C-alpha cells in the first residue's frame, strides 16, 4: 500500500515570496491533515479536512496561509507572502475518516522542508 | 485545553539495556494517546496507541507503553534497546470530544553500541 506522498521535499525561497506544497493521501482516506513542525518542536496542526470540507483550521494563519482539497483527495497548502518564521517542515497526514476518527491512527508523509531567507 | 509533556529532551542508553521514554498529559475528558517515531529526513511513523481497555499496549518494533490514569502518564518502553532505535520520539494526545492531536516536543533517543 502506498503511503502519503508529498512534494516538493525541499524548498528555499526569499521572504515575501509565495510557495505551495502538495499532498496525496493514502487511497481511501477521507481525513487529511496539514502540520507545521518547527525545529526542536512537535508538529502543530494547521488544518484538518474531512473529504473536501474543513473540520478545524483554528491554528491556520489565515492572513497568509491557505489550503484546499477540492475533490476530496489531493490537497495543496499555500503560503503567501512567506515570512522568516515560516521556515519549518510541513507534514501531511491522512486517516480513514470513519465514525471513530478520533481514535484513528494518522499516517504521515515525509514532509516538505521549507527555508525562508 | 489539552497538552503533552516529555520531560526529557534526550535519553541515552547502551544497546541491550532497557529503554524508557517518558510522557505525561493533561486533558479534560478521556484521552487517546499515541507514540510516533521520527528518523532523520523522514515523516513520523506510528508505534502504538491507547484508546481503551488494557493499560499495557504493545506496538511495533518491540515497543510497549503503559497507560497510568492516576499519574496521567503514558511512558514508552522497550526491554532491550537496539542501535537502530536511535531516533526522535513523540507522544501525542487527543481527547474523546475533540479533534486536535497535540504533540509533545519530542525526546531524542541515542542507543550506543
Image (cartoon, rainbow, N blue to C red):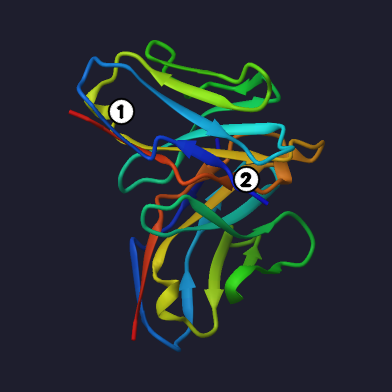
A73 w.r.t. A37: above or below: above
**Spatial CA span between label 2 and label 1:** 24 Å
Give the answer, above or below, for where A25 lies relative to A20: below
Q: Position of residue B69 (x, y in %)?
A: 66, 60
Q: Nearer the viewer, residue B22 or B18?
A: B18
Q: Residue at x 58, y 62 (%)?
A: B74
Please state the total of marks drawn on the protein image: 2
Residue B65 in sight from this viewpoint: no
Q: Earlier in the sequence, mark 2 or mark 1?
A: 1
Q: Which residue is rendered at x = 72% and y = 46% of the image?
A: A103
Task: Give left or right: position of A12 versus B51.
Answer: left
- Can you tell which mark lies on residue A86? 1
| Outermost residue toward the left in this view | A117
Q: Residue at the far top: name it.
A: A63
Q: Chain of mark 2?
A: A
For disc 2, the marked residue is A106
Check disc 2 and report its element: helix, strand or loop: loop
The single residue placed furthest to the bottom in the displayed view is: B16
* Chain of the residue on which disc 1 is drawn: A
Give the camera-side residue of A10 and B89: A10
Q: Which mark is residue A113?
A: none
**Residue B10: percent from the left, percent from the top?**
33, 66
Residue B32's x, y, as percent?
A: 67, 49
Q: Residue at x 40, y 35 (%)?
A: A8
Viewer-proximal residue, B49 or B30? B49
Amino acid at each position: 500500500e502506498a503511503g502519503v506522498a508529498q512534494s516538493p521535499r525541499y524548498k528555499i525561497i526569499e521572504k515575501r515570496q509565495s510557495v505551495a506544497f502538495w499532498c496525496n493521501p493514502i487511497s481511501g482516506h477521507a481525513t487529511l491533515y496539514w502540520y507545521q513542525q518547527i525545529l526542536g518542536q512537535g508538529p502543530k496542526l494547521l488544518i484538518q479536512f474531512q473529504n473536501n470540507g474543513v473540520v478545524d483550521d483554528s491554528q491556520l494563519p489565515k492572513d497568509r496561509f491557505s489550503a484546499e482539497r477540492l475533490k476530496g483527495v489531493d490537497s495543496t497548502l499555500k503560503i503567501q507572502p512567506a515570512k522568516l518564521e515560516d521556515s519549518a517542515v510541513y507534514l501531511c497526514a491522512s486517516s480513514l475518516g470513519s465514525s471513530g476518527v478520533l481514535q484513528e491512527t494518522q499516517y504521515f508523509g515525509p514532509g516538505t522542508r521549507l527555508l525562508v531567507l | 485545553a489539552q497538552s503533552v509533556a516529555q520531560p526529557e529532551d534526550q535519553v541515552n542508553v547502551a544497546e541491550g539495556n532497557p529503554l524508557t521514554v517518558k510522557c505525561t498529559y493533561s486533558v479534560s475528558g478521556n484521552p487517546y494517546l499515541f507514540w510516533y517515531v521520527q528518523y532523520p529526513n523522514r515523516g513520523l511513523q506510528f508505534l502504538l496507541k491507547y484508546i481503551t481497555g488494557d493499560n499495557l499496549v504493545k506496538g511495533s518494533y518491540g515497543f510497549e507503553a503503559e497507560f497510568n490514569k492516576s499519574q496521567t502518564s503514558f511512558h514508552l518502553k522497550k526491554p532491550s534497546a537496539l542501535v537502530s532505535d536511535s531516533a526522535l520520539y513523540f507522544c501525542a494526545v487527543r481527547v474523546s470530544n475533540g479533534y486536535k492531536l497535540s504533540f509533545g516536543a519530542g525526546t531524542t533517543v541515542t542507543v550506543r553500541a
